[in-house]
Amino acid sequence: MSESATSENSRTRAPRGQVTDIYRALRDRICLLRYPPGMLLGEHELAEEFTVSRTPVRQALQRLEYDGLTETRNGVGTMVTGVDPNAFRDIYAFRLRLSEMMGEFPAEGEVPRALSTILELQDRLGTLKVHQDMEAFWQLNHELHHATNRLIANHALRETHERYYFQASRIWYSVIEAFFEEQLADLAGELNEIAGALRAGDIRAVGYIQRNHIVFGLHRVAIAHTTV
C-alpha cells in the first residue's frame, strides 16, 4: 500500500481496545483527509496500532462503511470512499431538513451543558484569528456539532443527524482553506446566535440557526467546485 493507515504524521492518539473509540479515531482521520479517498485501511496494520485483535478493527470498519466513508472490495480490501460531487447537494439538502426537525424532539435537560460548551468555544475561537490552524478549526466545529446533537432527544434522529454531519464535513473540510477568514466570521456568528437561543431555552431556534449556516457552507462548497 502506497500510504500507510498508521502514518507517522497522524496526530490522533490511538485508543486501546474499544470498537467505538477506534471507529471515532478512524472517522476523524478520514474527515480531516489524513486518510484520503482511495487509501487502503489494512486490518492487520490497524490492529497493531490500536493493540487489539482484528475483530474490533473489522467492526469499526463496518461502521465506517455503513456511514458511507469506506467500502470493501473483493480482492482489494477496505478503502476510503471518494467524495461524489453529484451527491454532496443531496447530503446538504438532507442536513437542512434534519436541522429543522431538532425542535420537534427537544432534549431540554441538555440546554445548560450545551450553553456552557458554546461559551467555551467562543473563547477558543479568538485564538484562531491569530493562528490559522485548520485542524483546530475543524475541532471547534466538531464540538459544536456534538453540543447541538445532544439537544435532540429522539435517538434515531440524533444518530442520523450525526452520520450526515460527518459525511458533509469531509466535503466541507476539503475546501475550507480557501475561505478560512469567512468561515471564522460565520462560526463566530453561529456561536453567538446559538448562545442567545440557548439562553432563551429555544431548541427549535438552534435548529434553524444551524440550518442557515449549513446553507452558507453549501454555498462555499458550490463555489469551490465551480472554480476547480
Image (spheres, rainbow, N blue to C red):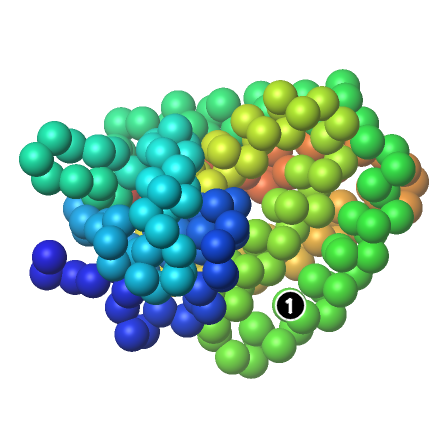
Q: Residue at x 48, y 32 (%)?
A: 164
In the displayed structure image, the side of residue 105 where residue 52 appears, left or right: left
Against 10, is 5 above or below?
A: above
Instruction: Locate the N terminus by quadrant.
Output: bottom left
Between 103 and 26, the residue placed more toward the observer is 26
Q: Which residue was labeled with disc 1?
A: 125
- Name the amino acid type tagged 1: Leu
Q: Residue at x 47, y 25 (%)?
A: 93
Q: Quadrant of residue 71?
A: top left
Image location (x, y in percent) of residue 214: 54, 38
At mark 1, the secondary structure is helix
Q: Residue at x 10, y 39 (%)?
A: 76
Image location (x, y in percent) of residue 212: 61, 36
Image location (x, y in percent) of residue 218: 44, 38
Q: How many marks?
A: 1
Mark 1 residue crowding within 10 angstroms, few (<14) / some (14–19) / many (20+):
some
In the current view of this chain or complex, which residue is farthest to the front?
53
Q: Is residue 31 visible?
A: no
